Image (spheres, helix red, strand yellow):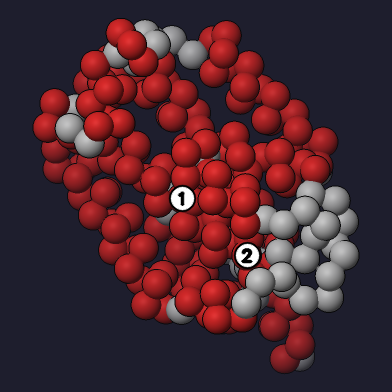
Amino acid sequence: MKKMFLFVWILLLSYTIFLAPGHGFGDDPTARALVSGDFSNVDPLVTAVFSMLGLYPVIFLMLLIPKDRCRWPAWPFALFSFGLGAFSILPYLAFRKDVTRREARGPGWLRSVLLHPITIVFALFIAVTLYLTAITGGSVTAYGEAFMSSHLVSTMTVDLLVVVWITFWLAKYEWHLRFSWLAFIPAVGVLVLLLQRKKLSVEESNEDR
């Protein structure tokens, strides 16, 4: 599977450098508006996707830090994903080496905070708000136009698809959660899985038998 992560990383880089349509940052008013936080001139669906990518690094911290037992620490890559998204997480999953620790690194209170129901529900609230923003004001046509005219929008769209796939893989193979396919519902699905992780854990179900 490590080779798969490496392969997807190379594909993502190749798409971004050679194939992604749209203007570069200097000639892209949409990109400048998104980065500067001037969302008034950007279609709400574009804004929602951009903001959703800002929520996923928090989700990666929730998924990776409590399971951080490999030779390479997860936290730098999770933090870098705030700006790089899947471009940061994929190389970590590809090169993190084997498990070398009996317990996850880092303070226990941090893991408790990340997985506390209040933290997860707050993230869920943000995700649902972004869905409502996209549904009530977004335009698929406008998004398609932005995809073709903005290099940032075309890249972040593919990036979102990749991070959704990564969270599905982590939910299924690292957390061993039933109904892991829910992670394909961007942000909301994987947060619901984490909120109900004790009930959905395959490992705990087997221990109860």
* Picture coordinates of residue 92, whole percent (x, y): 71, 45
Q: Which mark is residue 56?
A: 1
Q: Which mark is residue 65?
A: 2
Tag 2–tag 1 contact (CB < 8 Å): no
Question: Camera-side residue: 6 or 132?
Answer: 6
What residue lies at 30% left-to-right and 13% top-to-bottom? 28
Give the alpha-carbon distance from disc 2 to disc 1, as whole Å: 14 Å
Question: Camera-side residue: 165 or 2?
Answer: 2
* Picture coordinates of residue 87, whole percent (x, y): 59, 34
Q: Quadrant of the C terminus?
A: bottom right
Query: Which amino acid does the dot numbered 1 rest on?
Result: Tyr
Secondary structure beneath dot 2 equals: helix
Dividing the picture into quarters, in which one does residue 180 lie?
Answer: bottom right
Pick whichever of labels 2 and 1 is earlier in the sequence: 1
**Is 117 situated above or below 90?**
below
User: 92 left or right of 182?
Assistant: right
Q: Which mark is residue 129?
A: none
Q: Is residue 85 visible?
A: yes
Query: Which amino acid does the dot numbered 2 rest on?
Result: Ile
